[in-house]
Image (cartoon, rainbow, N blue to C red):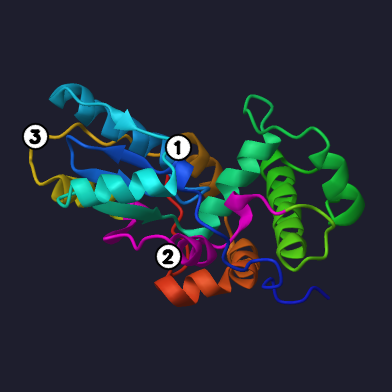
């Protein structure tokens, strides 16, 4: 049996170079790997273009500190994603051939070590569900230090990521993806803001087609600290 996935999920130093500052919007975005980061950066970019500004990226810790000291009105924020959806999004990123993160070796790994066993008569949703469940077992083994693999940041718990962020700065706000559109509007302080894109709607639909109690239970066994720290309930499938 796998141990609790806490051995390698300790806080690491923050990835400050991934932070994005939008000076016209007076915001600093602190990405949580595996979250709706591309959509949020696009939203911030649209604001900056409208206001004649530009995004500041790839900052050092010193540059971040100087930016905040020189712009006391800047507010930083991070966005949490439901652990089930976050895990599924990384699963799709590594298993869909059209993605930059596609790993063709993953199928063999899931079959040989993590119990992926499909049958000839299995329906497509059944095959997909079995593959995701095997992937979740891989995540659990990796975070327990039992897979022999490295631990990419998107596999780590969101609590661990934010604890690492806290070594340098503390976000002014930690938002939920579910309410991101209205929360960002409030944060920006204006009704005249660009529409926020729905993050990864195709990925959400794919998860909705296979989600069940077994998946929820598996994810809770991996990311129990996120559920406890942030009060996540069961994921709600949508059409």
Q: Residues within 10 Å of mark 3 (few under 14, many from 20)?
A: few
Return the disc, 2 or 3, that comes first in the chain's sequence: 2
Residue at left offset 50%, top offset 49%: 15
Residue beneath label 1, please?
Answer: 200
Circle nearer the viewer, 2 or 3: 2
C-alpha distance separating marks 2 and 1: 28 Å
Q: Residues within 10 Å of mark 2 (few under 14, many from 20)?
A: some
Q: Which x, y percent locates residue 153?
A: 60, 51
Q: Check if residue 53 falls in the magenta segment.
A: no
C-alpha distance separating marks 1 and 3: 24 Å
Q: Which x, y percent locates residue 234?
A: 47, 67
Dividing the picture into quarters, in which one does residue 157 lie?
bottom right
Q: Residues within 10 Å of mark 1 (few under 14, many from 20)?
A: few
Circle nearer the viewer, 2 or 1: 2
> Toward the viewer: 229 or 215?
229
**Quadrant showing the N terminus:** bottom right
Residue at left offset 76%, top offset 54%: 134
**Quadrant showing the C terminus:** top left
> Toward the viewer: 91 or 55?
55
> Toward the viewer: 70 or 140?
70
Residue 192 — which label?
A: 3
Residue beneath label 2, please?
Answer: 166
In the image, which residues are magenta?
151-178
Return the disc, 2 or 1, that comes first in the chain's sequence: 2
Q: Label 1, secondary structure: give it.
A: loop
C-alpha distance separating marks 2 and 3: 32 Å
Drawn side of residue 157 relative to residue 117, left or right: left
Q: Residue furthest right?
A: 112
């Amino acid at each position: 049996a796998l141990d609790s996935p806490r051995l390698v999920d300790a806080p690491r130093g923050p990835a400050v170079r991934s932070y994005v500052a939008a000076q016209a919007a007076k915001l600093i975005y602190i990405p949580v790997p595996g979250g709706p980061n591309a959509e949020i950066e696009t939203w911030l970019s649209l604001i900056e273009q409208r206001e004649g500004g530009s995004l500041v990226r790839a900052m050092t810790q010193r540059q971040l500190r100087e930016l905040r000291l020189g712009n006391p009105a800047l507010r930083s924020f991070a966005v949490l994603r439901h652990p089930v959806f976050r895990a599924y999004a990384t699963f799709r990123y590594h298993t869909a051939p059209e993605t930059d993160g596609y790993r063709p070796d993953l199928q063999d790994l899931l079959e040989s070590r993590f119990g992926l066993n499909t049958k000839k008569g299995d329906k497509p949703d059944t095959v997909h569900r079995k593959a995701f469940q095997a992937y979740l077992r891989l995540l659990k083994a990796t975070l327990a230090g039992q897979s022999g693999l490295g631990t990419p940041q998107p596999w780590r718990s969101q609590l661990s990521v934010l604890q690492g962020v806290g070594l340098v700065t503390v976000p002014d706000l930690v938002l939920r993806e579910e309410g991101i559109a209205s929360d960002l509007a409030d944060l920006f302080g204006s009704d005249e803001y660009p529409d926020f894109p729905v993050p990864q709607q195709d990925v959400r639909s794919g998860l909705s087609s296979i989600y069940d109690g077994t998946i929820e239970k598996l994810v809770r066994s991996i990311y129990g600290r996120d559920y406890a720290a942030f009060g996540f309930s069961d994921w709600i499938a949508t059409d």
